[in-house]
Amino acid sequence: MLTLRKLRLSRGLSQKEVADAIGVSQNAVSQWESGNRTPTLDLIIQLADLLKCTTDDLLDKQAEPNNLLKLRKKKGVTQKEVAEAIGITPVQYGYMESGKRNITPKNLMLLATYFNVTTDKILSIEDDENPGWLEIQEKPVPVFTESVFMVPLVATLRCGYDAAGKRIYDVLKEIELPTSYRTRYGEDIVLIKAIGESMLPSIRPRDMLICKPGDAWEDGTVVVINLDDSDTIKRIYRAEDGGIDLIPDNPDFKIKHMSPDDIQDLNPHVLGRIVRNMGQDM
């Protein structure tokens, strides 16, 4: 994180002063600046507050295009009305809508709830006419004009394997999806139905989720992870102590930290990652 070093120096702070301010060792700050380690989400937020910058500035992210203007016009509201609804200033919202500033995870979830769409629709640059484009609504009826293929809706991502090494699932039924999804996400995708409220508002109970099986993940990935012989959906981050943090989007639910010892004892296993929320009642 070379940007961390630049921001620290611009504020006239030493590594030790930064470390003391956020309660970590000077070596941890040095590791972050050298790129050998990455701070956890809560520490990134503390660093941004200390250095008077946004998390996007700290991570040196470039703003990306979004569909906020289209969604706002469709709803017939002003920038000020949207800003007031999610608790930010009209200037802040204007920067997000114009693409001059990235949308924070918190604001992304608030905007998805306000516009009654998935977070995927806010961030995607596809057009409304694109097949498979689904808003979150009570009973969406997708109309596909392209060819389709069958995707299994499974009870769990836990599976067995046949003689050829192919995964064998407990399949509830098969659902048609556009073949473009196979091109984008791969032949092995499956659907699961969300249960529980820990990932609200980005994932609601009964939302259909496209999952990419496998144990690969990066910080911030929404994964299906097996804990205590049951599956749960959470955002996953590497913790500074070498463990992992499982973070719900719903602030009413607690973050679960697993130390290296916890991981060794409980053997949590990432079964797959969520690549798209298709909404409800497909």
Image: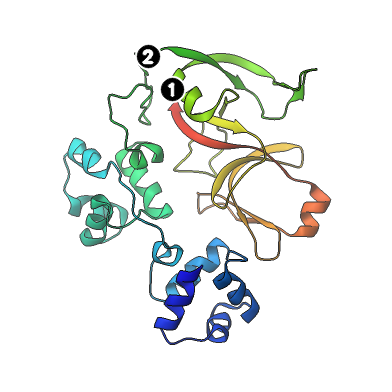
x%, y% of residue 213?
Answer: 63, 32
Q: Looking at the figure, which quarter contains the C terminus?
A: top left
User: CA gap, disc 2 to disc 1?
Assistant: 8 Å
Residue under label 1:
180
Secondary element under disc 1, as helix, strand or loop, is helix
x%, y% of residue 180?
Answer: 43, 22
**190 left or right of 207 in image:** right
Q: How is the image coloured?
A: rainbow
What residue sits 25% from the left and 57% below the top?
95
Q: In the image shown, does 119 or 146 lie closer to the viewer? A: 146
Secondary element under disc 2, as helix, strand or loop, is loop
Kindly indicate the quadrant of the structure image that contains residue 269. Answer: top right
Q: In the image shown, does 140 or 253 lie closer to the viewer? A: 140
Q: In the image shown, does 268 or 78 lie closer to the viewer? A: 268
Q: Residues within 10 Å of mark 1 (few under 14, many from 20)?
A: some
Q: Quick check: marks 2 and 1 in contact, CB under 8 Å? A: yes
> In the displayed structure, would residue 222 be above or below residue 282?
below
Circle number at residue 1: none
Lower sequence index among marks 2 and 1: 2
The residue furthest right is 265
What residue sits 46% from the left and 33% below the top?
277
Check disc 2 and give the amino acid type.
Glu
Check disc 1 and give the amino acid type.
Ser
Kindly indicate the quadrant of the structure image that contains residue 83. Answer: bottom left
Circle number at residue 146: 2
Kindly indicate the quadrant of the structure image that contains residue 161. Answer: top right
Q: Residues within 10 Å of mark 2 (few under 14, many from 20)?
A: few
> In the displayed structure, would residue 160 be above or below residue 232?
above
Residue 213 is at least partly visible in this image: yes
**260 left or right of 211 in image:** right
x%, y% of residue 74?
Answer: 20, 35
What residue sits 39% from the left and 55% below the top?
104
